[in-house]
Image (spheres, rainbow, N blue to C red):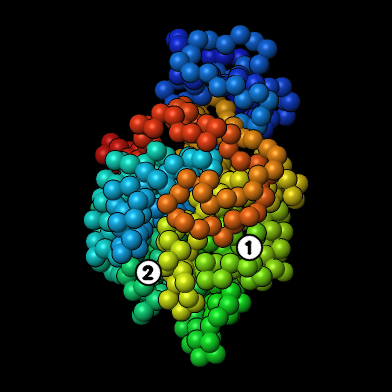
């Protein structure tokens, strides 16, 4: 980022006091100077050289030369997608799951979750309304809800959902039978239904998201592995091979292109989805991946707790995914955060697929890509916030610049071991436990309010923005 992209580096003429001033911030620009960042009404209104005097402010935070970067945008989370038999456990029920998991996200520098409405409802609109109510009551972070399409009734609800602020709709391809029931009633569309869904999404000016694994291939491979005795991460990987992802990604992008519908292939786990995009060459396509496909593998000593779909791949492929990210072939990242407790992940056949990780996504990406592999901070910011902001209609996010939303993270650097009891989550395990972080959040600011600092949650009465309302208001004005 160049100084010109910041706009004027001097303070804008504003009233006093400011909501917040961050002193001595290291910002990703071509200018190595430290900045003082002034915030009013949740927006960055001034950026001055740290040697210049600052305006009065209600709150002051000294970054002391640390990096200050945009808060991460997690493009894929499942907060409040609960295992209902554990609703009585503190942090895992309908009255507190958003509260606890949003705190955990903020502790890890994630200020915005693109979160899925709870699966299993006969009505997409009902699930969306319930999600808005829970997040509005509890969430300390910003939330934008994704919708989903699991049957043609959901497809019929698209126009109303868009008018109410839903801009993205997810489709599944692999889930059937008992596996679908075990995940709360997930349903997959066949190709003919997907064709109709893409057309409806495009006609209403929205975007599609696709879980791309071919159901026929997965069913056949899963039957084979179950017969042999599924008992390892490697066996789980064989039950959902990379060819299933490639086949489904190619089909989804082809059908989306035919409908002129923007589509994102979510949680890409292999090069096959990347090759599919290279083959289809649809400008409206994007690829999301997850940090676990780079830093975990079938060699990880985590047993069924590592069960996720698509699965963890072998170490060589994990390294290839890292290289693909470094080459610019992935657009943004989601955590695919799930809130299943360890008790739901005790055996290979019935364990719920999905990993916790919203609070570790940014620290792990900083560690793996910036510290270990030499990625620039500018590029890291694109992957963790800016690209997602532009893709999903949140242009005020993802930059430290004048006029941008003040969702910010002050980074600490050094060495820190990941410990489950320090993650501020209700989930009682982490597949990353014992790993060493090289960067993490020293303080997190959401909407100009310091919501996490030095392991504490000041201003805990703060509630993040329900970002779908931005689109609902815009639709109402038309």
What residue would you read off at disc 1? 296
Residue 239: image location, x then y, percent: 54, 80
Which quadrant would residue 415 be assigned to in this image?
top right
The location of residue 240, given as percent across then percent down, is 54, 77
Query: Residue at the location (53% across, 18% down)?
Result: 60
Return the disc, 1 or 2, that comes first in the chain's sequence.
Answer: 2
> Is 399 above or below relative to 322?
above
**Number of the label disc, if any, that sits on residue 467:** none
Specify whether 1 is left or right of 263.
right
- The residue under label 2 is 183
Indicate whether 140 appears above or below 272.
Answer: above
The secondary element bearing badge 2 is classed as loop
Residue 284 is situated, as x and y percent measured from the top left of the image, at: 52, 56
Q: Are marks 1 and 2 in contact (CB under 8 Å)?
A: no
Q: Position of residue 111 (x, y in %)?
A: 48, 40
Residue 202 visible in image: no
Q: Judging from the image, what secondary structure is the residue with disc 1 in?
A: loop
Q: Residue at x 68, y 22 (%)?
A: 34
Q: Quadrant of the N terminus?
A: top right
> What is the quadrant of the C terminus in the image?
top left
Few, some or many residues within 10 Å of mark 1 (<14, 14–19, 20+): some
Q: Around disc 2, counting alpha carbons within 10 Å, would you say few (fewer than 14), some (14 to 19), or many (20 or more)?
A: some
Q: Up-down: is 472 above or below 429?
A: above
The residue most toward the bottom is 227
Q: Quadrant of residue 322?
A: bottom right
Q: Residue furthest front?
A: 421
The image quadrant of residue 408 is top right
Whether residue 318 is visible to the viewer of this picture, yes or no, is yes
Which residue corresponds to the image point at 74% horizontal and 50% vertical from the top-left? Answer: 372
Image mark count: 2
Q: CA distance from mark 1 to mark 2?
A: 23 Å
Kindly identify the residue that appears in the image at 32 percent across and 70 percent down.
185
């Amino acid at each position: 980022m160049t100084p010109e992209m910041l706009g004027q580096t001097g303070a804008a003429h504003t009233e006093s006091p400011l909501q917040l001033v961050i002193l001595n911030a290291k910002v990703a620009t071509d200018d190595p100077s430290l900045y003082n960042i002034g915030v009013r009404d949740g927006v960055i209104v001034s950026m001055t050289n740290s040697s210049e005097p600052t305006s009065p402010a209600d709150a002051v935070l000294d970054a002391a030369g640390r990096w200050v970067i945009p808060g991460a945008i997690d493009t894929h989370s499942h907060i409040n997608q609960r295992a209902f038999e554990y609703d009585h456990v503190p942090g895992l029920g309908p009255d507190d799951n958003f509260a606890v998991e949003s705190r955990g996200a903020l502790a890890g520098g994630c200020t915005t979750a693109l979160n899925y409405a709870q699966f299993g409802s006969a009505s997409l609109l009902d699930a969306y309304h319930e999600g808005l109510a829970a997040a509005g009551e509890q969430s300390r972070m910003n939330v934008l809800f994704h919708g989903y399409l699991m049957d043609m009734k959901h497809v019929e609800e698209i126009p109303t959902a868009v008018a109410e602020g839903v801009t993205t709709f997810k489709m599944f391809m692999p889930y059937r039978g008992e596996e679908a029931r075990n995940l709360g009633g997930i349903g997959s569309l066949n190709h003919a239904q997907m064709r109709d869904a893409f057309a409806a999404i495009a006609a209403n000016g929205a975007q599609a998201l696709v879980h791309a694994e071919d159901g026929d291939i997965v069913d056949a491979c899963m039957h084979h592995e179950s017969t042999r005795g599924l008992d390892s991460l490697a066996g789980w990987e064989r039950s959902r091979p990379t060819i299933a992802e490639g086949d489904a990604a190619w089909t989804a992008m082809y059908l989306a292109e035919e409908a002129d519908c923007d589509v994102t292939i979510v949680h890409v786990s292999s090069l096959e989805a990347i090759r599919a995009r290279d083959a289809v060459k649809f400008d409206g396509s994007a690829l999301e991946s997850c940090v676990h496909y780079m830093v975990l593998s079938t060699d990880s000593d985590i047993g069924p707790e590592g069960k996720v779909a698509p699965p963890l791949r072998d170490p060589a492929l994990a390294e290839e995914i890292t290289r693909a990210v470094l080459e610019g072939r992935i657009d943004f990242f989601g955590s695919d955060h799930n809130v299943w407790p360890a008790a739901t992940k005790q055996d290979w056949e019935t364990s719920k697929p999905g990993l916790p990780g919203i609070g570790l996504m940014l620290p792990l990406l900083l560690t793996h890509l910036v510290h270990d592999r030499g990625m620039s901070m500018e590029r890291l910011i694109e992957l963790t916030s800016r690209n997602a902001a532009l893709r999903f209609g949140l242009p005020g996010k993802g930059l430290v610049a004048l006029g941008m939303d003040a969702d910010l993270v002050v980074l600490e650097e050094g060495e820190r071991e990941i410990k489950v009891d320090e993650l501020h989550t209700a989930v009682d395990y982490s597949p990353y436990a014992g790993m060493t972080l090289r960067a993490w959040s020293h303080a997190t600011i959401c909407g100009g309010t310091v919501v996490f600092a030095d392991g504490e949650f000041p201003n805990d009465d703060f509630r993040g923005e329900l970002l779908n309302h931005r689109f609902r208001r815009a639709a109402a004005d038309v």
